[in-house]
Image (tube, helix red, strand yellow):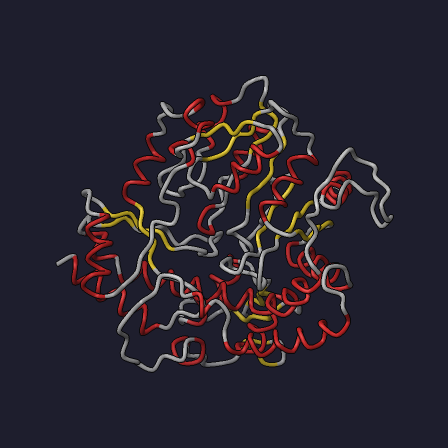
Amino acid sequence: MKTLTTISGHSKDNLALLKCLQGETKEKEFEISNILPNHKMKEKLFRENKLKIDIDIEKDIFNYSRKNIQKIEFMPVNRLISQDEVEKIIGVLKDVLPTGQFTSGPFSKKLEEVIGSYLNKKFVIATSSGTDALMVSLLSIGIQPGDEVIMPANSFAATENAVLAVGAKPIFVDIDQKSYCIDPSKIEEAITKKTKCILPVHLYGKQCEMKKIREIADIYQLRVIEDACQAIGSSNLGEHGDIIVLSFNPYKNFGVCGKAGAIVTNNETLAIRCNQYSYHGFEIDTKNKKVLDFGFNSKIDNLQAAIGLERIKYLSYNNLKRAYLAQRYIRELKDLEDRELIKLPMMTEDNVWHLFPIRVKNGRRDELKNKLYQLYNIETDIYYPVLSHKQNTNWIKENYLQKNMFNTEQVHKEILHLPLHPNMMLEEQNFVLEGLFNVNK
């Protein structure tokens, strides 16, 4: 008897769906949850809520046609949005612009409801950016000037900047060399009487070891804010955190046509405070009446929320495409890993593949990067070229210049990000693969 599996659109289900589409699990039948982030996946892969028979991934999902490729951009800005999406977003603009409801309006609330349903969380506060979401979240849990917040040193500067902006001190902790996320075994030694929060970052789309982090936080009565700006769609996101912070920057797995983000929680008290801090400290739904000493102008614009409601329809489908491209890289590059020339990431159920990192061994990272570009016109990237504790700022010089984090620094010397985005063609990925093998002969 076949097992009926419901596709939620999250990473674990997407991986199971990929295995089925590739003929690895024929005993299962799939249906799909009728939620907005699954809209495009349902349209492309399902009929009457059941998975279509005989889907060809290369033909039906990627339209593989063996085009001749001459150049690969790492993240082409003119392809962040598909033409199909462009036409629908223009329709949204035509609907919203005549109303004049550019900043406040009904779409913000609707987007919050969609995200809450997708993540199975009670409260969502849509914000003007992921950075603002971090600052508001830190204030909501009571972070004060002088408090310490534990975090990794290999994230985007926004993570540490949010901590500094509320007067607290980032305490950088080393990472795990396999996941590139903060190492739970190194957290406890960094805790002091001033520590108030752990701020793990789900880097490149993969979750940290949240169960272990939660256990440590509970022992020391610390709050946990998950920086999930690169991880929307990862299964069980926020299960162990007090707050999840998201970014809807256009480069993220789900983005609007500008900057936006969200705060997600099941804690009503924190949700109320986040709402207040995100709009000038005002009482919720009450004009100009402050209940907090201060707050920010950090709410999402109604226009961006309206665009988000259209773009979120592609989230699960795009994450499925990202997973397939990552799986294909891992499979095709195994020979280079076996020859100990590179180290590949693992295909795990919690990864939504915001980026695809490899590690180039034997001190050849920069040489490989340069050859790929000079010989084959293939752009790769070192996404965060300067670690947080190595930035050339007065604050870092005073606090962290001599700090040594072996794993973080070793990974940073070797890491290289290969092109991967949902509008990438298989012909383009083949071109990258060919270039990698040619420069590693």
Confirm whether residue 336 shows in the render: yes
193 horizontally vs 407: left or right: right
The quarter of the displayed image where residue 177 is located: top left
Confirm whether residue 268 shows in the render: no
The quarter of the displayed image where residue 430 is located: bottom left
Would you place residue 413 above or below residue 50 in this image? above
Q: Residue at x 68, y 77 (%)?
A: 94
The quarter of the displayed image where residue 274 is located: top right
Would you place residue 282 above or below residue 70 in this image? above
Q: Nearer the viewer, residue 13 or 180?
A: 180
259 horizontally vs 439: left or right: right
For the N terminus, give its image quadrant.
Answer: bottom right
Q: Residue at x 55, y 59 (%)?
A: 10
73 horizontally vs 274: left or right: left
Q: Nearer the viewer, residue 164 or 314?
A: 164
Farthest top residue in view? 193
> How far from the left and from the top, in percent, is residue 328?
34, 64
> How far from the left and from the top, in percent, is residue 373?
24, 60
Q: Residue at x 59, y 50 (%)?
A: 246
Q: Residue at x 21, y 53 (%)?
A: 368
> How far from the left and from the top, in percent, is residue 136?
67, 40
> How far from the left and from the top, in percent, is residue 202?
49, 45
Q: Nearer the viewer, residue 169 or 409?
A: 169
